[in-house]
Structures are given as structure tokens and as C-alpha cells.
Image (cartoon, helix red, strand yellow):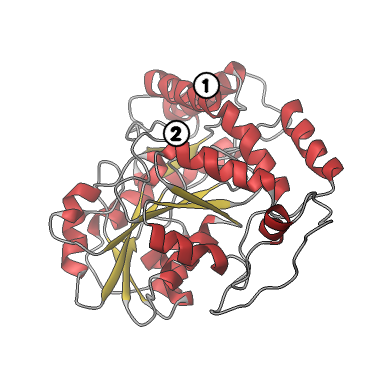
Amino acid sequence: MKIREQMLPVSQPLGGVDDIDGLAQVINSGWWGKGPRVEEFERSFAEMVGVKYALAVSSASAGQDLVLKAIKASGHDVISPTISFLTTGVVPLWNNCKSLLVDVRREDLNLNPESVRKRLTRRTKAVVAVHYAGVLSSIDEIREFYDGFVLEDCAHACFTQGAGIKGDAAVWSFQAVKTLPTGDGGMITTNDKVLYEKLVPMTWFGISSTYSRVRNNGDSLTGRPGYTWEYEVEEIGYKAYMHDLTATLGLTQMKKLGNNLAKRRHVQRRYNSELPKIIERPYWTETGQYYSARVPAHLRDALINYLSAKKIHTSVHYKPLHKHPLLMQKFDFSVANSEWEKLISLPCHSALSEEDINYVVYWVTKFFDGEGSS
């Protein structure tokens, strides 16, 4: 097979004319900040998840940060899985917390409830349950012995049915290669009214939004008549709100989410049925955020280099957090230590064509037929 001229990305967003038209409408409206599109996106997202409240923020990381601040986590312990992006391990450090990592289950790479149990102390303020690759963590098992705050990290789980409804709150990511991409952005969802009302002013220095004051007191987006500039700040806030340009992409991408997820699941099915048997298939995921296959550890890096030479971009999701000097700690990470060295993420996204999938399958097969694995 002829080698491609351009690299085939491991992840990629898929935009269209509807996204461009939506952005044009916002640009032409003259209202680019937090406004009606953000409110619409929040309502639609809450309805999709099946919760009462949704708060659009600048990123999932900002969302986790705000939640930890809202529950006054400073000085306490926060537990999260070592197989995760840096956010879950580092954001507790922003909040003067001890970031305690736990091992994962071999089958789905989600946090191991027994490891969580071993980490619990009277200082534990929250458990962050990452839904790795869109597969739901075992929150029910954790609830059997822990009745404290659970934050669901749904960055990979938009939308897996049941995500965001078993924790006390959830954070979602709309970063550029997520299943619902907006470039960047996030959402906090919860059924807790007190928590929600505490979080809203925290997104903008403790101030009510400009749009809310225009909407409630004026007749138009120009603020005439009735725009009120008066407000009072009672508590420390931050700058983490979403604006209408981002929310518009969220709304247009939501309409395509079902079709885009169907494409990702199609990629999974083809890989599962056509890749060489030596490759261990990942746990099935409804979102297909990553196709994190496992290969013999001594061949993983060779396969990555081989596919790169064939213009196929791959990745590893993820190097365990406890292997970074910042988060290094003593604990039993035997499963993570063993399994991460086998991980390789193959291209899996809604922009892949059938020819692209054929191309990946062909060259992976060639590698294991002896061309690159000897």
C-alpha cells in the first residue's frame, strides 16, 4: 500500500458549515461574551445529562478547580486514579490539597475501588472518578464504603448514558479533540442547588454576569434602557466563564453528537474485528474517545515508530501520574505500572474515512506479520 503524504492524526475535530454559520450569527449579533448562547447551551446540556443544573466554564480543569474551591477542599486529601491526564492530579495541588493517587483495574483502567478504600482517611475531601475513555467508573462500589464528595470526571464520557448522575457533581471537557469539541471549554453539572448557586458567581470574580444584568433590566443587548452597572462582591471569585462563541460551537456540535459517536463506534468495531489477534482490544466505550489497545510491552515503542514512518500518528493514554516527579508517591500501583507500557492509542475519531481505517489496519497487520516486529 502506498504511504500517505500527510500524517493521519490520532484525534481530530470535525467541523462544518453549520458551525461556521453559528459563529457568524454570534459575530454579527455584537454580543460575543457570556450571553444567550451560553444559557441555551447550559439548558440543553443539563437536559441531555439528566440533571438540574449546568454551568458552562472555560475548561474542565477550571471546572474541577472551582468545585474543589466551592467545597473548601484546601488542606484536605483528594483521591484520583494514576491513569489519567494531569488535570486530576495537579488541580488538587492548586488548592493546597494532598493529591493521593490510586491504582486502576486491569480490565477498563478505571480507578480500583479497593485502592480507594486503602487511601481513605479522615482528611479525605473528595474522590475524583475518571470515566476513562468513556467507560463508567464503579461509583456504586465506592459508595458502599465512602459517603463523601464524589466528583465525576466526564472528560471522555460525552455522552455515555449514566455519566454525571452518580457523583455529587461532574465536570465535562469540550477541548479540541473531545467528542463534543469547541476548541476548549467545559461544563460543571450537578443536582445540588446550594453548590450550583455557590459556583455561579465564582466563574467571574464574584460578579453577576453582564448579560444577566442587561437581560433583567434592559430591553436590548445594547443595555438601553435599564442596564445596571451596580453590583457588590461578597466572596472571592475567579475568571472561568464560557462565552457565546464557544457555546455556539457547543450547540452545533451537540446536534451532531449522535452521528459523530456512531462513527467512533464504527471505528472501534472495525478495529476489533480486523486487527491482528496479538492486539488486546480495549474495553468497549460508547464514546470512542480513545482506542487504547494493548500490545506486548517490548513491541509498543517499535510499533509507534513504525506507524509514524507510515504517517500514522498514535499516542499513549496515559503515562501514570505517579511517574511524574511532581506527583511521585509510594503506593501499590502494580496494575498501572504493568499495563501502561502496553498501551497504544490508534486513530479513532469521527473524521476518519473507510480508507483511513483500512490504512491503519493494513500497516498494523504488516508490522505484526514481521515487517517491523522482528
Disc number at residue 287? 2
Q: Residue at x 80, y 49 (%)?
A: 220
Residue 265, x across and y down, in percent: 45, 25
For this rendering, which residue is in front, 342 or 9?
Answer: 9
Q: Which residue is mark 1?
A: 362
Q: Is residue 373 visible?
A: no
Amino acid type indicated by mark 2: Thr
* Left or right of 18 in this view: 63: left
Q: What SS does tag 2 mark?
A: loop
Q: Residue at x 19, y 77 (%)?
A: 122
Residue 68, x across and y down, in percent: 42, 69
Amino acid type indicated by mark 1: Tyr
Vertical comparison of 306 with 352: above or below: below
Give the crowd class for mark 2: few <14, some 14-19, many >=20 residues within 10 Å.
Answer: many
Looking at the rendered structure, the number of numbered marks drawn on it comes to: 2
* Left or right of 357 in this view: 7: right
